[in-house]
Amino acid sequence: LLFTTKRVIFVDIQGFMGMGKKVEYISVPWKTVTAFSVRSAGSWADKDSEMCLWLDFDDVFNPQRTNQDDPPPPPIPRRSWIEIDFQKDKVDTLVIHRYLSERLMRVNGHQLKPFTNPVSSDLLVPSPPGTGEKLLDWIGDNAAAIDAEAVDEKFHEAGMLQHDEHVAFAFKTGRDSLYLTNKRLFVIDVQGFTGKRKEYMSVPLDVIRSWSVESAGNFDRDMELRLWFKGHWNNKVKQDLRKGKADIFAIQSHIAHFIIGSADGTAALANAQAYEPSPPGAATKLLGFLNDAHMKDPVELTSTLRSSPALLQDDESIEAAFKCGRDLFLVSTKRIIVIDKKGITGKSVEYKSHPLMYNKAFSIETEGHLMKGPKAKVYTDDNDIEQELAKGEKDNIWAIHNILSEKMLNEPQEEIGEVEVEIDLSTE
């Protein structure tokens, strides 16, 4: 296994016991790596630690069924997800974590570290014995919501973060914990019966393709955060958050700031109205004042969603809003937002965001002669978005068509993190 300034090279000596003459050299450019993790070895029976890389190309293989009545065999990731085993106690996985962080975290406006800038040798110094265990022991003494400033200090002491990286949110559920910094989503997963085995997973914020927050219902103790990142194998992160211990809208605003903060927030429709602050108390009507089966007033919704809940950014406004049953389908100047009321009471509400910059194609379907109304579908890298409108919504389905046409055809935005830039590190 070779790490270079431009790629990681896997040298695979094939044949029995690695004694064959056939050798495969696999090159993976750093720009194709979307997320990474390292795992420490577990108890005495576990002899290996691992490094895992998530790649942005689809090489997943779905085997055919042996018999028609058999359940489908599990898919095989092949090169979409790579796992490398290291001999226990022979490789410092935290050094690998620091190296991958430096090489894969974005700098200078969402760009990869230039290959002309080598990783500092200071980051490759072996970690003090017990570094990971001491950090987790400290985390284990804290409550469900952890003080972000205290975590930031401890993480920097342990060398888990970059020098210009800081923790904004920190949560602990059971043995596991999740952290949001200004550069990544960081998950610590304690595994196995003894808890000796630990996985440290990093998902750079720039590779997140959609996200959702879900409030707790009448009978739920936990809220939920879900993120889907660029990749084709197990590219979803889910975390329960204790009810009353986390501000889910502050979390979603933090993510939105780094994903769509620089996106163009101007309106695509010529008659879009300017935002005006809402009067006190108007925000509480978000899910109550909406009637079924017609387009909603974008100005009123923009005013509501900038205050309670604070879902929109300052330069973001709603261009079209539709309600079907209990759910809402919103098209803003930066993203598509699906508000899904769940459960019998509808107290649990999921707010899922799909940035417009990552939508690939779209279609609209006009209504037929039967009961079904028109339908809009947006194709993404992950789960496609489908929304059926009420019967008689002919004009509104074309409004969705016009907005998506303007954003995806006339004003397309490049995905962030696609171009390398040079950084001048010289000192005056």
Image (cartoon, rainbow, N blue to C red):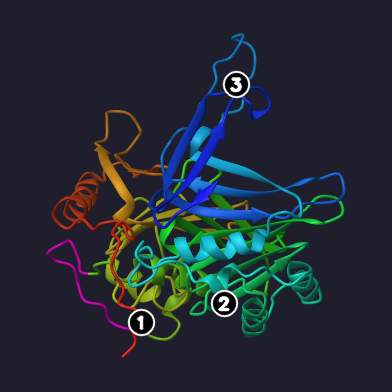
Q: Tell me the residue that label 3 is attached to.
A: 72
Residue tagged 2: 167
Residue at the image position 50 percent from the left and 59 percent from the top: 212
Counting other residues with Cα less than 10 Å from the Cα at mark 1, is it few (<14), some (14-19), or many (20 or more)?
A: some
| Mark identifier at residue 278 | 1
Q: Nearer the viewer, residue 22 or 66?
A: 22
The furthest residue to the bottom: 428
Q: Nearer the viewer, mark 2 or mark 1?
A: 2
The residue at the point 27 percent across, 30 percent down is 368
| Position of residue 296 in the picture relative to residue 64 (left or right) | left
**Residue 344 on image: x %, y %:** 63, 51
Point out residue 294 in the picture as x, y percentages from the top left corner: 31, 53
> Considering depth in this image, is 42 or 329 the residue closer to the camera?
42
Earlier-in-chain disc, 2 versus 1 = 2
Highlighted range, magenta: 266-278
Up-down relation of residue 15 to residue 202 (above or below): above
